[in-house]
Amino acid sequence: QVQLVESGGGLVQPGGSLRLSCLASGFAFSYYTMSWYRQAPGKERELVADITSASGRINYADSVKGRFTISRDNAKNMVYLQMNSLKPEDTAVYYCNVAFGSRWSWGRGTQVTVSS
């Protein structure tokens, strides 16, 4: 079955960096667009970034443009989110996502806390 396992979250000071990773299994990874979402306490889950199968098209939320970079390694079934210049408002649980038409699969998420 489809599995998405996120890692790399933690506590970081404002201005710091973190690199999130997502290991995917159970489907033909290289064929699918992969996404990172986040959900802060009391807020709806929002799209952070997505990347098409051959990395031909990448989209970012306006709030993270210029600070975050999404990438993928199809040989390793991995998708990454490099987060720089982190701000307290980036604090959230970050989720890896893949969509199979109308059916979406999610990982369990990894907590990112930006605080001094």
Image (cartoon, rainbow, N blue to C red):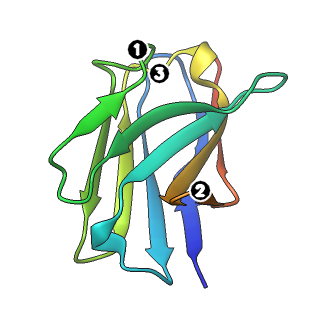
Q: Select label 3 or label 1 by which is in front.
A: 1
What type is the residue that disc 3 sits on? Leu
**Residue found at x 20% / y 41%:** 57
Check whether the beta carbons of the residues at disc 2 and disc 3 lie within 8 A of each other. Answer: no
Q: Which residue is mark 1?
A: 62
* Residue located farthest toward the right when viewing the structure as drawn: 42
Category of crowding for the residue at label 3, using alpha-carbon neighbours closer than 10 angstroms: few (below 14), some (14–19), many (at least 20): many
Q: Which residue is mark 3?
A: 86
Q: Select label 2 or label 3 by which is in front.
A: 2
Q: Is residue 11 visible?
A: yes
Q: Which residue is mark 2?
A: 102
Residue 90: image x %, image y %? 57, 22
**Residue found at x 54% / y 54%:** 97
Q: Is residue 112 visible?
A: no
Mark 1 element type: loop
Q: Specify whether 19 is left or right of 42.
A: left
